[in-house]
Amino acid sequence: MREEDCLDSEYLLHHLPVAVIIARHRVILNCNALALTLFRASDVQLVGASFAMLYPQQKDFETAAEHFAPLLSRHADFHDDRLMRRLDGTHFWVTVRGYGFNRSNPYELAAWVFTEADSPGREGLRGKVSLTAREREVAALLVDGLTSKEAAKSLGISPRTVDIHRASLLRKYAVNSTPELIRQIVN
């Protein structure tokens, strides 16, 4: 490989060891191969699209904008664990970090780094609730609308085990129903 190739920004972006998305006003300008893999997308599907397609719902996209803007404008070092949506429609937990290049207009140009949140005992949902890896898997499938039986089949466990994890999630989020739990998870 030539030295010139190593200094090419496109080459560097596409070979970074983390998923990266570059956006202008929350529209995806570019991304690397790991971002495509993480979101189960092709570059044709992502480049030029709004970030909204990667959130469970439109309101989550809007809430995230309010949450991240002050952090980006301060160039704060932050990470945020949240539920995102892959292009195949499934939901998954991700840790996101961002950097806005213009402090006065943080979404004018921003870089985002994503890592799938999959290690046991990690802090979840901005540090509010600590979830196990299995609880995150069950939570994502509940958000996808799967029943206990369907989630169990997907995970290769019994429906009773899914119900035990659902009960643990209800307790951790201090809610009484699955719809309330889902609202807490996606907000």
Image: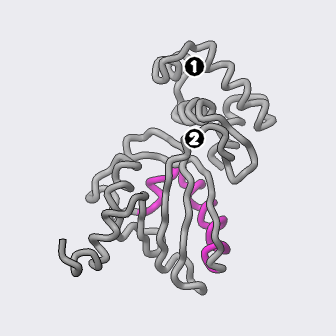
Residue at image point 46% right, 61% down: 51
**Mark carried by residue 148:** 1
Above or below, 100 relative to 163 = below
Where's residue 124, x and y in %?
Answer: 67, 46
Position in image of residue 13 (x %, y %) = 34, 68
Element type at mark 1: helix
Q: Find disc 2 in the rendering and name its residue.
A: 119
Which of the 4 image quarters holds residue 96?
bottom right
**Disc 2 secondary structure class:** loop
- Residue 67 falls inside the magenta stretch: yes
**Up-down relation of residue 107 to residue 60 (above or below):** below
Q: Would you place residue 51 above or below residue 117 in this image? A: below
Q: CA distance from mark 2 to mark 1?
A: 23 Å
Q: Earlier in the sequence, mark 2 or mark 1?
A: 2
Question: Would you say the magenta stretch is mainly helix, strand or loop?
Answer: helix
Q: Is residue 90 magenta?
A: no
Residue at figure coordinates x 27%, y 75% from the top left: 6
Q: Using the image as rendered, state which of residue 178 and residue 4 is in the foreground.
A: 4
